[in-house]
DNA sequence: CTGTTAGCGCGTTCAA
DNA sequence: TTGAACGCGCTAACAG
């Protein structure tokens, strides 16, 4: 039986009200009374019941995040890092973090959003990895429920978000490969329904077109953001009659799969095949070879969207409602000039 | 302004109680009344306020999990997979999942546990990655708070846990290497304060001793469970005058770092150096070479500890209060007989 | 079958 | 400076 206000009041012959005020730091309490109350609370091991506080305050001081997971073997380091950022910032601001893991675009996911919003389980939500037809955003906008998204949306809805400029990032990455002398550059992207897939592919196209390079459908593949997907698509691309000399991947896990496939074929990555990723998850710095990638500060993104949401919940105006961060190309060892033995080097002559 | 019971009652000229009972599915309500209530609730978009329900029921139907994170670049795929298991099972059982991310063994972590327990934020807790002197477990046992741990504990405290037999697992892994002909086998373990580090190292020692192989302090290193740590320790080990022909890693990330280091030195992993990991995270199956590792079903572990905790919360007796699962060695390409060029092959003759 | 009353633990009127 | 009374939204015990 936990200690409640009434217990303290009874022991000190005070009213519950006075005890509540003393503990709440209200000014209209005699200094001596406050002292006695604080001491008694300490001694008795009192801790306020948050549920009761919430009912009274009509606030949960909790934010929610539904992580899109696919299958039991799901494990994207990207989300762990985002979670670390979100988790630390919520804690710092004395908020709670409610997490659910649901497969994207399913009835289960939809129900989870409804539960969270309509049961008043959370004060606000973070939406990660926006999609082309994002019913989550439509739902939240429709209900006027506070949220901040990581990622933009195609539709004409005005909501607060933070995004990283995937188009600029992938343009830079492509440009980097072109500068190195590559001409036959393949692309293994993310599933089309993800917004960022769209932008990143756009960056690739943009850079290729700027240099008058052909964009071949056969060189554009769609992965599933996993290492396995990258591996399989790369096997296919590398098996082409005229294989690419470089492969751009829509995320780092895919890139790691590409590297595995290349190595399995006896190619030296960075020489026989250049590979560039996107995200800069911790693992890729110490991969072999270390991965050239477009770096987005995932942890900081977590911190920032969380901070934006809490500002929103506290009724403050957001200084920037819609933010676009510029990613940075990090050149490591997985990219280099097309090697002497590669077919398309000859083609390029 | 959300719709509450009172609104429905007012519209139908009923009492709040009757409405509550109708919606709650109690039998003592006229069929026709129930129908009217259900329809009105539907039309008006009624959703019960969970906070009020919780206050009344004295239960939160929420379980908590504090993920130990180290630094901003933290990202262990292992935890993502565990989280997926826990998350899906909580949802299936209509529970909520409260997550915090805190650096292990710090005042912040301690405060988080106190907050969760003493503020009645959660009904029970999951404790992951038990430690040698685990104040979390001491605290929870001391308070009689319901929890289930992933991992055993040294002290003589009786609490429910699920663990994987790390000793047996690492013994198998070591045996595997010995069978292949390795004699000079190094070990890069986890930080000593983690319980599983203790068991896994024990398995290594046990197998080595069984075969009368010397256990050299110089061949036993301590990593930090990251790829970077594995990379650095491996560099040191491979730089020894008589380097090992095989390296056992305390977890898969460490093993991936070892592989990078070996490849950077021009060694072919699986021939010049054998590497074995522990965990079997999704990434290692499509690494190059694919990693031989001790497989523990992380997702299922998440599901199971979650299920155990919820059983506990519902007052049921646990069929097995303390469970030890046997891991399984998965042999892939990163391990093979010591290659012709390796020093210790000559030694072994 | 239905309504009245009471209470979960806390914060916030209003009066004294 | 303190206390009594009320309400947050809901469920449960008790009458009728």
Image: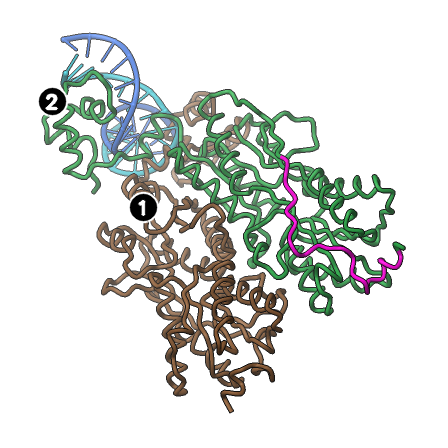
Chain colours: A green, B brown, C blue, D cyan
The number of numbered badges drawn on the structure is 2
Residue A65's place in the image compared with A308, above or below, is below
Residue B162's place in the image compared with B19, above or below, is below
Judge from the rendering whether residue B147 lies leftward or rightward of residue B227; answer left or right: left
Instruction: Give x and y (percent) for residue B182.
Output: 50, 83
- Magenta segment boundaries in residue numbering: A326-347
- Estimate how packed mark 2 is, as few (under 14), some (14 to 19) or many (20 or more) residues with alpha carbons within 10 Å: few
Instruction: Please identify the residue farthest to the bottom as the structure is shown.
Output: B349
Chain assignment, label 1? B
- State the image quarter where residue A23 is shown: top left
Q: Pointers 2 and 1 in contact (CB under 8 A)?
A: no
Residues at discs 2 and 1 both on one chain: no
Instruction: Give x and y (percent) for residue B311.
Output: 36, 56
> In what element is the residue under mark 2?
helix
Residue at x 49% of width, y 34% of height: A306
Instruction: Give x and y (percent) for residue B186.
Output: 45, 74
* Residue B115 falls within the magenta-colored stretch: no
- State the image quarter where residue A59 is shown: top left
Instruction: Give x and y (percent) for residue B237.
Output: 48, 70
Q: Nearer the viewer, residue B138 or B119?
A: B138
Q: Nearer the viewer, residue B87 or A273?
A: A273
Residue at x 57% of width, y 61% of height: B282
Q: Which residue is mark 1?
A: B113
- Estimate how packed mark 1 is, as few (under 14), some (14 to 19) or many (20 or more) residues with alpha carbons within 10 Å: many
Q: CA distance from mark 2 to mark 1?
A: 32 Å
Residue at x 42% of width, y 45% of height: B99
Q: How would you classify the magenta stretch by its main secondary structure?
A: loop
Which numbered dot is residue A32?
Answer: 2
């Amino acid at each position: 039986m936990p200690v409640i206000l009434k217990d303290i009041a009874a022991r000190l012959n005070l009213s519950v009200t006075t005890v509540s005020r003393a503990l709440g730091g209200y000014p209209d309490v005699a200094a001596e009374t406050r002292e006695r109350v604080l001491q008694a609370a300490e001694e008795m091991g009192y801790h306020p019941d948050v549920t009761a506080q919430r009912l009274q305050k009509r606030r949960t001081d909790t934010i929610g995040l539904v992580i899109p997971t696919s299958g039991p073997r799901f494990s994207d380091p990207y989300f762990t890092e985002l979670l670390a950022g979100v988790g630390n910032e919520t804690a710092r601001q004395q908020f709670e973090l409610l997490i659910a893991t649901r497969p994207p675009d399913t009835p289960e996911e939809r129900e989870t959003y409804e539960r969270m919003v309509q049961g008043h389980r959370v004060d606000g939500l973070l939406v990660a990895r926006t999609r082309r037809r994002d019913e989550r955003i439509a739902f939240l906008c429709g209900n006027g429920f506070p949220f901040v998204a990581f990622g933009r949306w195609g539709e004409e809805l005005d909501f607060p978000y933070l995004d990283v400029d995937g188009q600029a990032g992938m343009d830079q990455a492509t440009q980097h490969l072109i500068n190195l002398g590559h001409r036959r550059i393949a692309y293994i992207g993310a599933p089309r329904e993800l917004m960022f897939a769209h932008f990143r592919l756009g960056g690739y196209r943009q850079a290729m077109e700027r240099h008058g390079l052909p964009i071949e459908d056969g060189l554009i593949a769609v992965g599933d953001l996993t290492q396995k997907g990258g591996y399989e698509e790369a096997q296919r691309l590398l098996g082409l009659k005229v294989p690419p000399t470089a492969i751009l991947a829509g995320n780092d896990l895919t890139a790691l799969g590409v590297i595995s496939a290349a190595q399995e074929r006896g190619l030296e990555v960075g020489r026989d095949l250049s590979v560039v990723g996107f995200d800069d998850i911790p693992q890729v710095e110490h991969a072999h070879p270390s991965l050239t990638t477009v770096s987005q500060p995932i942890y900081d993104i977590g911190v920032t969207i969380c901070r934006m949401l809490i500002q929103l919940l506290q009724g403050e105006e957001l200084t920037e409602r819609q933010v676009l961060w510029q990613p940075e190309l990090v050149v490591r060892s997985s990219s280099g000039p097309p090697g002497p033995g590669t077919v398309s080097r000859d083609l390029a002559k």
